[in-house]
Image (cartoon, grey):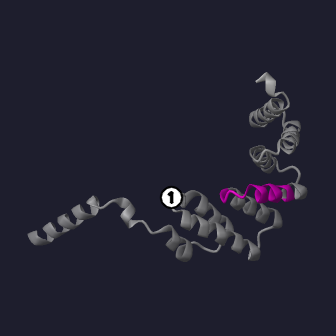
């Protein structure tokens, strides 16, 4: 191999190494529009895990997720779960809470959904509803540390509101 060819390879590889890795990255919007299949769960996960640094791409991906759910062959419960997750990601707490209520009407044994809903109710200041959900969780699984902690936290907040002098 001629010396000038080796020098060109060396110079080329050196310049590639000095270029930041993120300059080779494909923009999230391009991935969303061209690469990802039309799968609502996959598009949602892409929005949640890969678009944190690009709010525009995240918004687009979450909107696309909701759009794909309309024609999806997924079961109704799975669609509701994805929809509620999109609402949570978008900060639409009331829509997420209502969608989770629909999930629980279809399957009252969905403990993870009930836990998330209780937490959202608590954050929204709907303490009595949060308390009921947390109590249901503890009744279903008395040994679950997270359920018990959530219940105690909600009860503590309710107590503070009922007895402001005892703080």
Q: Residue at 85% of width from left, 55% of height from top?
A: 101
Q: Residues within 10 Å of mark 1 (few under 14, many from 20)?
A: few
Q: Nearer the viewer, residue 111 or 121?
A: 121
User: Could you tell me if residue 30 is visible in this image?
Assistant: yes
Residue 92 is covered by the magenta coloring: yes
**Image quarter for residue 24?**
bottom left
Residue 157 horizontal/vertical position (percent): 79, 33
Q: Residue at 69% of width from left, 61% of height from top?
A: 86
- For the record, the magenta segment spans 89-102
Q: Quadrant of the C terminus?
A: top right
Residue 127 horizontal/vertical position (percent): 83, 41
Q: Residue at 71% of width from left, 60% of height from top?
A: 87
Residue 111 horizontal/vertical position (percent): 81, 47
Provide the residue designation for mark 1: 53
Residue 19 horizontal/vertical position (percent): 29, 61
Q: Residue at 89% of width from left, 37% of height from top?
A: 139
What kind of secondary structure does the magenta stretch mostly adopt? Answer: helix
Q: Nearer the viewer, residue 163 or 79?
A: 163
User: Could you tell me if residue 2 is visible in this image?
Assistant: no
Q: Quadrant of the N terminus?
A: bottom left
**Image quarter for residue 138?**
top right
In the picture, measured across the screen, residue 103 lies left or right of residue 2, that is right
**Image quarter for residue 143?**
top right
């Amino acid at each position: 191999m001629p010396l000038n060819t080796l020098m060109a390879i060396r110079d080329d590889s050196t310049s590639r190494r000095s270029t930041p890795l993120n300059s080779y990255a494909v923009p999230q919007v391009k991935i969303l529009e061209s690469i990802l299949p039309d799968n609502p769960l996959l598009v949602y996960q892409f929005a949640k895990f890969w678009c944190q640094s690009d709010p525009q791409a995240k918004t687009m991906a979450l909107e696309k997720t909701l759009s794909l759910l309309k024609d999806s062959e997924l079961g109704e419960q799975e669609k509701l779960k994805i929809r509620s997750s999109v609402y949570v990601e978008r900060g639409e707490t009331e829509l997420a809470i209502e969608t989770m209520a629909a999930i629980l009407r279809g399957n009252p044994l969905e403990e993870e959904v009930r836990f998330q809903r209780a937490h959202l109710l608590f954050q929204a200041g709907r303490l009595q509803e949060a308390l009921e959900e947390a109590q249901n969780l503890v009744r279903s699984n008395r040994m679950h540390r997270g359920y018990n902690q959530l219940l105690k936290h909600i009860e503590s907040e309710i107590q503070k509101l009922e007895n402001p002098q005892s703080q």
